Image (cartoon, helix red, strand yellow):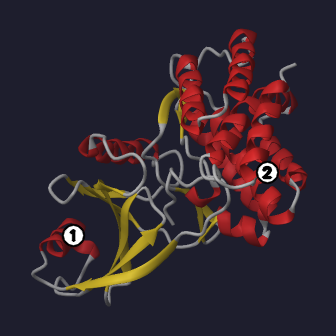
Amino acid sequence: MYNSSEIIGAVIPVLNHHVSTLGPGDVFRDWLVHALGDRIKNKHCKVDVFKYLPSSHTVCRYKFKGERYSVIVKFFAEPTGKLKRYNASEAMAKEYNNLMAVRSIINVPAPIAMHRDFNCALVTEYISGKSLAWHLSHENDLYDRLTSVAHMQRRLHEHTRHDYYDKARDFANFHSVLDHLKLDRSTRDHFDQLLGKWWYSHLLDQRQGCMIHRDATPSNYVFHKDVPYILDLESSWYNAHYARDLGIMCSELKNHFQLQKGSGRLAEPYIGHFLWHYSKNESDFLRTTKVIPFFMSLGFLRSARLHRHYPHHEYLIKEAAACLRSLG
């Protein structure tokens, strides 16, 4: 269920496997039972532990035998991705607070508890169901699923508006992604020139920002009994541009169809459907379609980090540049 922010691009299945069974006397298991309170009737039950891969941190599902109840625990002090140096306690508290802040707006796993001494463990509700990534891979009810995700993103963005949009941060992040790709000088200069045109175009300028997910990939949306939930708010931004979440999702859709069907153009009906259902009206839709190429370009470059040593890398770089050139 949980997707690593380091593994981006192709729709990668998130797998879990059984790693252990905990009984009474295990310190962490006993703390979990205490933290869950009345949710667990048999305080002496055993707990099966399942580990999820891939993930940016150690992430496990704890299933309480005989209770029909599970939780997800993310250990922020156990990073498994490229980012190793960060304040794990702050990251744990940030995701907990993000979940608390938006739970009345959109469907998210309920935050239950956190504990710094257990490798900065964050405990959240376990949401069963199939992810948008699964529906994308199977092309199962994809239009309806994208409609639900678009509406949920709209609610998140509309109800978390802030006083300003931090435009400089988006460009700094864009350049950071380019730095990681270590492109040849000519290609990098081309991207820098294109980004300069976007900076001075004022097309991205807006008076207000909002909270965004920032890793709006298909694996981070799960449908439980047809109700959409959004997962993994650890990297969320405030004072952000609403179109960033949309652009990342659209780049993911196009990249998937390029990899799995041989043509990214097959994603265009789904992208148009997604953006239309996000928009309130036609003018809103037209405004969004003008800015979306900037963030789709960023999405392709994020994906390119995964494919640096594969032929698909060239396609992603070309698509990213083409998106930026759409400014004219």
Percent position (x, y) of residue 325? 83, 25
Sequence-wise, the earlier of marks 1 and 2 is 1
Residue 167's place in the image compared with 297, above or below, is: above
Position of 313 compared to 240: left or right?
Answer: right
Question: Which label belongs to residue 32?
Answer: 1
Q: Alpha-carbon neighbours of circle 2 within 10 Å: few (<14), some, or many (≥20)?
A: many
Percent position (x, y) of residue 173? 54, 29
Q: Is mark 1 on a helix, strand or loop?
A: helix
In front here: 300 or 45?
A: 300
Q: Residue furthest top?
A: 200
Count all numbered tags in the image, as a single digit. 2
Question: Which label belongs to residue 95?
Answer: none
Q: What residue type is labelled 1?
A: Leu
Quadrant location of residue 248? top right
Residue 313's place in the image compared with 69, above or below, is: above
Q: What element carries label 2?
A: helix
Q: Do the residues labelled 1 and 2 touch (CB within 8 Å)?
A: no
Q: Distance between the residues labelled 1 and 2?
A: 41 Å
Question: Which label belongs to residue 254?
Answer: 2
Query: Which residue is located at x 68 percent, y 14 percent?
Result: 199
Quadrant location of residue 296? top right
Position of 250 compared to 158: left or right?
Answer: right
Q: In the picture, which quadrant includes the C terminus?
A: top right
Quadrant location of residue 123? bottom left
Percent position (x, y) of residue 54? 49, 65
Position of 139 compared to 216: left or right?
Answer: right
In front here: 189 or 73?
A: 189
Percent position (x, y) of residue 129? 57, 72
Residue 260's place in the image compared with 293, above or below, is: below
Q: Alpha-carbon neighbours of circle 1 within 10 Å: few (<14), some, or many (≥20)?
A: some
